[in-house]
Image (spheres, rainbow, N blue to C red):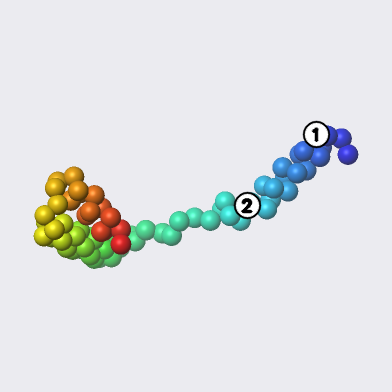
Amino acid sequence: MPRPLGLLTIVAVLLFGAAPALSQTAPAKPRSPGVIATTDRVAMARRAACQKEARAKGLSFMKRLSYVKTCVKR
């Protein structure tokens, strides 16, 4: 097999094998206003709780921001 044809074959096989993994999409975001509002309320409540915890610990401003960021992700 000539060298360019062999390389083309290898590339085609790799792309064919990777196609299912590359075609996956992220889950759809909620479109309903009620679902969006509920999700926002939950996120805001979680953030408020984390901010209260950070203030109760007496953290400085920058440490408080970092703490809230990591707390919300949990």
**Total marks in image:** 2
Residue 70 pos. (x, y %): 28, 55
The residue carrying mark 1 is 4
Neighbourhood count class around disc 2 (C-alpha, 10 Å): few under 14, some 14–19, many 20 upward: few
Instruction: Residue at 23% x, 54% y: name it.
Output: 67
Q: Position of residue 40 (x, y in %)?
A: 23, 60
- Nearest the camera: 73 or 57? 57
Query: 23 or 44, which is in the foreground?
Result: 44
- Quarter of the image containing the C terminus? bottom left
The answer to whether residue 37 is seen in the rendering is no
**Is residue 2 found left or right of 44 in the rendered image?**
right
Identity of the amino acid at label 1? Pro
Splitting the image into 4 quarters, where does residue 46 fall? Answer: bottom left
Residue nearer the viewer, 38 or 33: 38
Q: Which residue is mark 2?
A: 19
Kind of residue at disc 2: Ala
Instruction: Give the Cα distance between marks 2 and 1.
Output: 22 Å
As drawn, the residue found furthest toward the right would be: 1
